[in-house]
Amino acid sequence: MARRLSTVDVLADLPDIDAANVVRCARVLLRRPLLRPGGPDGDLLSLVYRHRAVLQELFASLLGYRLVVERRFARLYKAGPGPDATRGATGLSPRAYAYVALTMAALTGVGAQVLLSRLVADIRSAATEAGVEITDDLADRRALTTALRHLVQLGVISETDGTVAGLTAEAPAEALITVHTDLLGQLLAGPLADASTADELIERAAATGSVEHAVRRRLIEDPVVLHADLPDEHADWLLRVQRKESVLLDRCFGLITETRAEGIAVTDPEEYLTDVVFPSTGTVARISLLALPELIASYEVPYDEEAEESRGRPDGRIPISEATLREICRRLVEDYPTAWSRQATEDVDALAAEVVALLGRLQLLTPDDDGYLLSPAAHRWLPQPDETPGATTVSPPSPADAQPGWSLFDEKDDT
């Protein structure tokens, strides 16, 4: 049996220009798992097709992902986000997600073209068959319209005559919809025939065949991976090979890893693969940034008298109460009143909720029984507001001012 080449070997056998193009295509496919002409980054489809054999080997050997490439599309079958509610498509509510699934079910039996009114009737019929309660109010029609627009953006359907936006009108306008069945059949990532429930379908779609595939998927898909969050077998493997994996992710995907005692953070210097850019502009993003050092400082590590030492959580996370977070947001708003959007700061409770949502998407804050847990990766950002009230600038601390502490981004002692 022929020896299976490792991912690094696959790239090493290529000329430098071809290797760079393969990495470029791999990054595009990670961001656009369904690549098509006319869609975002669709101009690279011909390059993906040219290097399809190497790309298929790269994804299969490194991540256990299946890549299907044809002249009209490329589909990378990635593992789903699982229970992480922050990783879904932006703009899709749970109701709209349900309509996406119902629309896909209805499209399988309508042929190459269908009238919008007929498609809506088939969707409602599929909902009734699935036991999903639907209404015909404005909110429900908007959710359906959002689902249809999402499928238009994916290239699964196109508006040949008219538009799906007419569904929200009091008298819905007719439209002719063209169904691209080749793309429709590529949407589901899991083996539908083998799953009897939705949870089982997600589980099968995310299944991995090896420890290294599972851990690498986490490293690529999650900005911060803590050893404490991994199964023991996975954490042990990562600790053994973390330097080699850092080289591998940089070589194959242009990703930079920061390895510390508690885990690994992965960043994209070009921010192309970054879901949420942080730090960023806007009131919520800037207050979230300024709140991090105050949240860290608000925690007093419990002292163990018997051991005569301070002891925090084994995973390095910091417990934060909801009241503390709201108070810090309120104080930042009051101390620098001219720095923020008036509309965003009128309701401090709502502002605090938006800060929680943003830090949650960044995986810096996770819900706990009576509050939140702040990731040790929060030590990565230590901004200092200007002493002048109303100023909007943020400057990093000087090395002399930085306080030492146990964090994800402390230098690891290799001795």
Image (tube, rainbow, N blue to C red):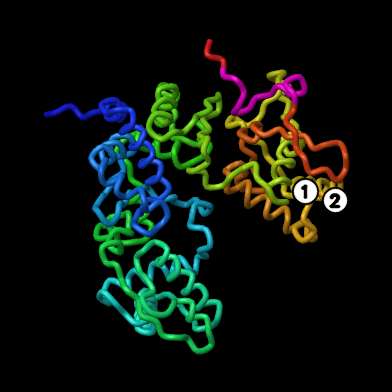
Q: Nearer the viewer, residue 143 or 182?
A: 182
Name which residue lies at 55% across and 28% down.
262
Q: Quadrant of residue 174?
A: bottom left
- Looking at this view, name the residue that lies furthest to the left: 1
Most extreme residue toward the bottom, as rendered? 171
Q: Which residue lies at the image location 79% right of the left edge and 45% below the top edge?
A: 328
Q: Identify the image quadrant of residue 243.
A: top left
Work out whether 309 lies above or below 264: above
Mark 2: which secondary structure? helix
Residue type at numbered disc 1: Cys
Residue 57's disc number:
none
Q: Position of residue 337 (x, y in %)?
A: 85, 51
| Predominant secondary structure, magenta span | loop
Number of numbered discs visible in the structure rendering: 2
**What segment carries the magenta color?**
398-412
Q: Amino acid at mark 2?
A: Pro
- Asked if residue 289 lies left or right of residue 93, the reply is right
Q: Position of residue 231 (x, y in %)?
A: 43, 34
Nearer to me, 186 or 233: 186
Instruction: Please report the residue visible at 49 percent of the width from the left and 82 percent of the height from the top.
Output: 135
**Is 258 colored magenta in this rendering?**
no
**Front one among 354 and 39:** 39
Up-down relation of residue 114 to residue 234 (above or below)? below
The residue to which callout 2 is attached is 337
- Residue 27, position as x, y percentages in the image: 40, 41
Tell whether 5 sits left or right of 297: left
Left or right: residue 182 versus residue 410 is left
Q: CA distance from mark 1 to mark 2?
A: 12 Å
The mark nearer the N terminus, 1 or 2, is 1
Which residue is depicted at the point 48% across and 68% down?
96
Q: Report if the CB atoms under discs 1 and 2 are less than 8 Å apart.
A: no
Q: Position of residue 392 (x, y in %)?
A: 79, 44
